[in-house]
Amino acid sequence: MGALRLTSLRLRLVVVFALVALIAAAAASGIAYWINRDAVLTRAQDAALNDFRDSLGDTAGSVSRRTSCDELQEAADAMANSAERYEVVLISRRTGGPPCRAASHENFTLDDVPRTLRTAVNRKREVDAANPAEYHLYWQRITLDGEPYLVSGATVIDEGGRPAPTGYMLKSLAAERDDLNSLAWSLGIATALALIGSALLAQAAATTVLRPVQRLGDAARRLGEGKLNTRLQVSGTDELAELSRTFNRTAAALEKRVAELSAREESSRRFVADMSHELRTPLTAITAVTEVLEEEADSLDPMIAPAVGLVVSETRRLNDLVENLMEVTRFDAGTARLVLDDVDVADQVTACVDARAWLDAVELDADRGVMARLDPRRLDVILANLIGNALKHGGSPVRVSVRTGKSGAVAARGAAGGDELIIRVSDNGPGIPEDVLPHVFDRFYKASASRPRSEGSGLGLSIALENAHIHGGRITAENAPGGGAVFTLRLPRDASRLAPDRDRDPDRDPDRDSGQDGVRDDAGTGTGGEGDR
């Protein structure tokens, strides 16, 4: 039997079986012991009392008040020679003299007889229809020096109807006690054997019952790990077999449903990716035309200029949306890859802000020389979205602080030595409503239904979060006690453990070559999260 957990079902079954067997065996043994004890003691007691009564009537009954003490002693010795092997004390009330006492053995005296028994033996009762005799035989079980005895006494009536000698008998019950002790030991051994047998039976029963349950648990665990083709071998027609059949039917239905959902998801993802790629060609042409129109805006008819400006802005917005959709599609498909490089975080933040002409609106609190091994392009995307979102909804000045610290959670996901990079972006705006906080990173989430349209795509913060996750980090949003929103980015300072075989020359990265991660160095790309809150 292997080691059992204190809370395991097997141990509980064994304990229950053992307790039931122990209670049943103890009850049966107790009943058997008391029945045998009563039978043994009653048999020994009745035999001794009957013999004492007969012997007292035959031997001591012939002793009169004029009998000498020697004759009384002979009568006591004669009674003690009975087959029951008891000791006797006779007391004769002699005429004109003190009472005479005769004991068959010096170890038994009148002092050994309980006072209550002597009182009952010497008490004369009135003779009537319900009581034909003046004196009666009384008995009592006592213990002397740790040994059990039966003591009895009676007063004999002589031929003249007068009280003759009074006799007391002391019978040892040591033999009966030894027999009962042997019986108790036998019953105890039987109870212990029953307990051991019940434990073995419980173990066998538990194994029979729990083996299918264990197989079912293992199958459920494999199913939870995504192995949807897991099935159980079913044999028999009992409840466990029916449970296994139910599991197999459920697993089959789940596998079919997941396959359908996966096919639909793959189809949707492929559609979005194909649509995005297909849109890029006409968008390129449209973008070229809008750029020309924008350059000629000053020479256009004043009635047409606003329309041209709207076309230009919406074309840029549509281009950003397509790029963001392609990025989201890569994250969903799991094809997004890290291209790691050693970067100075302060320089990276400064470059991000400078490229988008935000230097006047952003305050940077970062020490030079804080190095991290990250994907600089994806870090730029994260920073652009967080800072752009703060400028759009919180207003300037936006404060960006860079710190380092320790985190077991990040270390578990790949931070070297547990070091992590902490970047906080805070603004001076009204903050984020409490009901919006849980949804700020949701795709296309709008804080207000009254403004479903915004300049951003509604994907910026979700893309920033995905880029943090691919580094093994995370982003949290909260409201500062003094007002304003605070976004905290936590990244491992060395993400190489997450992609040991993906750290390659950016010039040979297929994502970069194909333009799939084409986030441009302008404000329009990094602010896809303006509409998120």
Image (cartoon, rainbow, N blue to C red):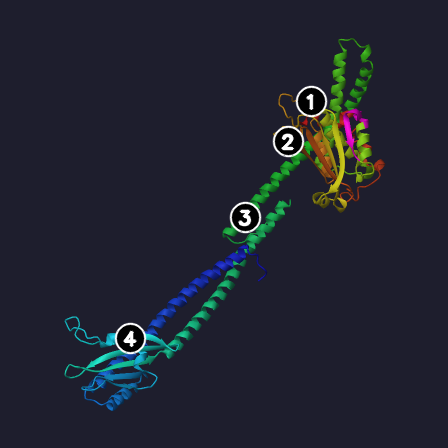
Amino acid type, label 1: Ser
Mark 4: which secondary structure?
Answer: helix
Compare marks 4 and 1 and give the one earlier in the sequence: 4
Which of 254 and 154 lies nearest the eye of the viewer? 154
Find numbered disc 1 in the image and state the secondary structure of the residue it sits on. loop
Q: Are marks 1 and 3 in contact (CB under 8 Å)?
A: no
Residue 335 at x, y percent in the picture: 74, 37
**Circle 1 crowding by C-alpha within 10 Å: few under 14, some 14–19, many from 20:** some
Q: Can residue 527 be seen in this view?
A: no
**Disc 1: which residue:** 454
Which mark is first along the chain, 4 or 2? 4
At 76% from the left edge and 15% from the top edge, which residue is drawn? Answer: 309
Query: Would you place residue 523 above or below residue 298 in this image?
Result: below
Query: Mark 3 highlights which residue?
Result: 245
Q: Mark 4 points at which residue?
A: 115
Q: Which of marks 1 and 3 is nearer the N terminus?
A: 3
Quadrant for the C terminus in the image:
top right
Query: What's drawn in magenta, residue-wise?
Result: 354-366
92 relative position to 470: left or right? left
Circle 4: residue type: Arg
Residue 197 visible in the picture: yes
> Is residue 52 or residue 263 the one in the foreground?
52
In the rendering, at what x and y percent does residue 266 appear?
68, 35
Against 278, is 142 above or below?
Answer: below
Image marks 2 and 1: residues in contact by CB distance under 8 Å: no
Give coordinates of residue 288: x percent, y percent: 81, 20
**Residue 139 in the figure: left or right of residue 508:** left
